[in-house]
Amino acid sequence: MERCMGHKVSVYIAALIIRASGFILNPDDPQQCGLPEVSHVGTRIIGGQEARPGSWPWMALLARHGQPVCGGSIITTRLILTAAHCFAKDVQEGNSLRDWRVYVGKHHVATKDSTEQSSNIRRLVLHPGFDNVTLLGDIAILELEDPVNFTSYVSPVCLPRGTGQVVPLGTYCYISGWGETQGSSNANVLNQATVPILHDYWCARADWYGAKFLYQATFCAGFKSGARDSCSGDSGGPLVCKADGRWYVQGVTSWGYGCAQPMFPGIYTDVSVYGDWIRAAAANLSATIRD
Ligand SMILES: *[C@@H]1O[C@H](CO)[C@@H](O)[C@H](O)[C@H]1NC(C)=O
Ligand SMILES: *[C@@H]1O[C@H](CO)[C@@H](O)[C@H](O)[C@H]1NC(C)=O
Ligand SMILES: *[C@@H]1O[C@H](CO)[C@@H](O)[C@H](O)[C@H]1NC(C)=O
């Protein structure tokens, strides 16, 4: 059900409090957020298509023991936004974050890209309200050991300001990831798909997700017929919508029944609901970053 392929850590609290310098630590700081230098290929994951390399420059690939597990989004040089469920099992079992590595500037999943950069994870902050059964609060922030360097292929996405959708319902937004494509596209590269954000009415219907759909903190996006969807391995990755010429991370890929099944579109953590938490957690992490 979860869109993670594998498992997901010890939550390490740094004792040293030393101010960082020269890095962008405030997610609202990067004036360059949400502005790729490479334009994406036009519309048309499941039912998706290969992304143009660099067109979603905030995409992060989260790998465990070298295996791709989840996606994420760059919000600052040090911080990656992702889904809590990617790490739930590791936290529960007390596994080390050392098993993980985060890649940015990446396109091919299995081979090295000339544009890629990578880092270990230093700390993980899961949303304190995360429920591993209902997947409520499926959002987390990773602090990287090595800050990423912004390039034409690596840059941050914008966080929504305030609550609610940054675009009207029905607007087509983009999902991207290295997850399962079920033969619909090249699984070795970053794929993208366009999906409309659906009115909560649909996913709350008894013949859709019913009460399992937690409309207060999630939204669903996709098609009544299935057609295009996120899938296993896409978890933690972004659903981005364009507003005022910039791309905002409106959703974090969370879960769904199957992939591209009729009446079971993808469910996304509504990032705008967690804006205050993200900013507070980012400030806490930044206050204790050691360099
Ligand atoms: C959810 O978390 C609780 C407490 O941390 C744990 O006991 C339980 O096994 C977890 N359930 C699943 C499905 O991972
Ligand atoms: C960013 O650049 C510095 C200096 O070249 C390098 O040491 C560091 O490893 C780079 N960061 C990443 C994540 O690759
Ligand atoms: C930030 O740190 C304060 C003080 O330790 C703590 O009370 C608060 O819960 C933290 N907030 C987040 C979002 O991590």
Image (cartoon, rainbow, N blue to C red):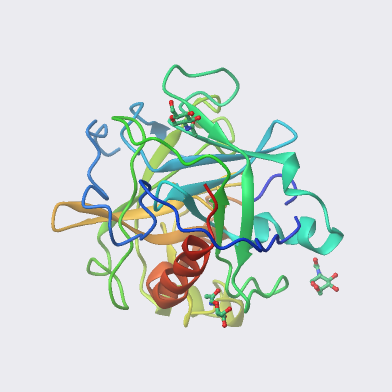
Q: Is residue 209 visible?
A: yes
Q: Residue at x 27, y 50 (%)?
A: 33
Q: Pinpoint residue 75: horizontal percent, then vertical percent.
A: 39, 53
Q: Quadrant of the N terminus?
A: bottom right
Q: Is residue 257 visible?
A: no
Residue nearest the viewer, comparing 263 with 12: 12
Q: Pinpoint residue 26: horizontal percent, then vertical percent.
A: 36, 60
Q: Residue at x 44, y 49 (%)?
A: 73
Q: In the figure, is residue 8 to the left or right of 252? A: right
Q: Residue at x 49, y 50 (%)?
A: 237
| Residue 198, above or below 118 | below
Residue nearest the viewer, comparing 240 with 169: 240
Q: Quadrant of residue 16?
A: bottom right
Q: In the figure, is residue 194 to the left or right of 186? A: left
Residue nearest the viewer, comparing 22 with 118: 22
Q: In the figure, is residue 38 to the left or right of 262? A: left
Q: Pinpoint residue 20: horizontal percent, then vertical percent.
A: 44, 53
Q: Residue at x 44, y 68 (%)?
A: 283
Q: Quadrant of residue 128?
A: bottom right
| Residue 86, above or below 211 | above
Q: Pinpoint residue 36: horizontal percent, then vertical percent.
A: 25, 39
